Amino acid sequence: MKRFFTFLLAALTVFAFISCKDNSTSPNNTGGIGGGGIGGGGGGVTFTMGTTQGQQGGTIFTFRPSTDVTVTTLTLKLPAQQFEDVLTNPNPNEVFNPQTEYSTEIEYTGVQSGQQWQFVFVGKLGSSTGTAYTVTANYTIP
């Protein structure tokens, strides 16, 4: 699997036709994510996670923040298989907003319904000069 990636803005309309996602945005809802986080604290940011099918038949993960944030790194983990992939954003000043769904643009193979994935987002709230956050998001593949 690729270790290097580029965060790319993916238009919501592209994913509308092929996306399968969990729209929960609260830690109290099924599939809800974020909140307190670990390390630097979550600062109240949550992430809505989802998946879409890639062009090669693999799975691409999607996310949407609840507020404007930057993302420095995103670590994807599948603890049951001891898999971990650390993705570094080449543009750590890029602001991700809640009106847009974003994609990792990397296809992962072997993703199956019922798997429990963990995503660790590290970045800053609002902009690259904002408060640091670290949020761990748990997501079960539908």
Image (cartoon, rainbow, N blue to C red):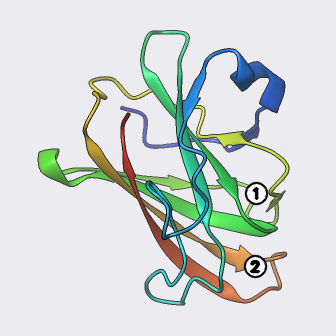
Q: Which mark is residue 104?
A: none
Residue 103, given in percent of the width and then of the height, sits at: 64, 38
Using residue 115 as the reference point, say whether residue 96 is left or right of it. right
Secondary structure beneath dot 2 equals: strand
Depth check, mark 1 against mark 2: the one in front is 2
**Disc 1 to disc 2: CB gap under 8 Å:** no
Using residue 84 as the reference point, say whether residue 137 is left or right of it. right
Looking at the picture, tell me which residue is in the foreground, 128 or 35. 35
Which residue is tagged 1?
A: 91
Residue at the outermost top position: 56
With respect to residue 88, does 17 lie above or below? above
- Position of the C terminus, as image quadrant, is top left
Residue at horizontal 44 percent and vertical 10 percent from the top: 57
Disc with the residue nearer the chain's start (1 vs 2) = 1
Residue 72, given in percent of the width and then of the height, sits at: 63, 66
Secondary structure beneath dot 1 equals: loop
* Residue type marked 2: Leu
Residue 37, given in percent of the width and then of the height, sits at: 48, 80
Q: Residues within 10 Å of mark 2 (few under 14, many from 20)?
A: many
Q: Residues within 10 Å of mark 1 (few under 14, many from 20)?
A: few
Residue at horizontal 54 percent and vertical 78 percent from the top: 35
In whole angstroms, how far apart are the C-alphas of marks 1 and 2? 15 Å
Residue at horizontal 27 percent and vertical 27 percent from the top: 112
Q: How many marks?
A: 2
- Position of the N terminus, as image quadrant, is top left
Using residue 125 as the reference point, say whether residue 114 is left or right of it. left
With respect to residue 122, does 58 lie above or below? above
* Residue type marked 1: Asn
Looking at the picture, tell me which residue is in the foreground, 39 or 113. 113
Residue at horizontal 83 percent and vertical 85 percent from the top: 129
Examine the image and state in which quarter residue 88 appears.
bottom right
Which residue is tagged 2?
A: 125
